Amino acid sequence: MNLKPLLVVFAIAGTIYPLPGFAVLGGDAASVEADRASMGGSDLGTTAGAGYTVREIQAASGTAIKEYLSPAGTVFAITWSGPALPDLRQLLGAQFDVYTRAAAAQNAGPGRVNIHDAGLVVQSGGQMRAFFGRAYLPAQVPQGVVLDDIR
């Protein structure tokens, strides 16, 4: 499946219909609630990890989204799993353009994206009704956080 035409459409749509700022990679903790409201979702609560906090949202689509916050209150990682892909433009924010360029240049199999850029890592896959993924900013991952715990 060729994703290039789809990525171009998303990129154009995003410039014509820009979204307001939400909790995005590199954003602050105060905007996580805006994500929940935008997705028509439910707040599933907050949990603490070793050196970070996780806010979980259940989107109206049924997709679970976890936003990982550093002790300084910065969103350094986001994960998702569920029946629908979340709005990656919203969640990746300024990193969305990096993501679309890297995904278009990648010759991955259908439904798979594996981007390891110096400033952004995105791993995503799945099929209809079973999507999963994670994105994080390597430079903003707090000291001592184990990347395998971000799932």
Image (cartoon, rainbow, N blue to C red):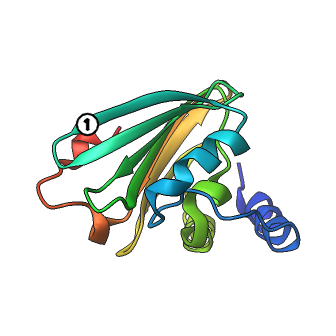
- Residue 127 visible to the viewer: yes
Residue found farthest to the right = 16
Q: Secondary structure at mark 1?
A: strand
Under mark 1, the amino acid is Ala
Looking at the image, residue 71 sits to the left or right of residue 59; the answer is left
* Mark 1 Cα-neighbour bin, 10 Å: few <14, some 14–19, many ≥20: few
Residue found farthest to the front = 30
Q: Could you say which is closer to the camera, residue 113 or residue 66?
A: 66
Mark 1 — residue? 48
Q: Could you say which is closer to the camera, residue 61 or residue 20?
A: 20
Q: Position of residue 81 (x, y in %)?
A: 52, 31
Residue 11, by quadrant, is bottom right
Quadrant, the C terminus: top left
Q: Position of residue 107 (x, y in %)?
A: 56, 60
Q: Position of residue 8 (x, y in %)?
A: 78, 68
Residue occupying the point 67% across, 32% down: 84
Q: Is residue 96 placed above or below 56 in the rendered structure?
A: below
Residue occupying the point 53% across, 40% down: 125
Residue 131, by quadrant, is top right
Q: Is residue 94 placed above or below 89 in the rendered structure?
A: below
Looking at the image, residue 62 sits to the left or right of residue 71; the answer is right
Looking at the image, residue 60 sits to the left or right of residue 119; the answer is right
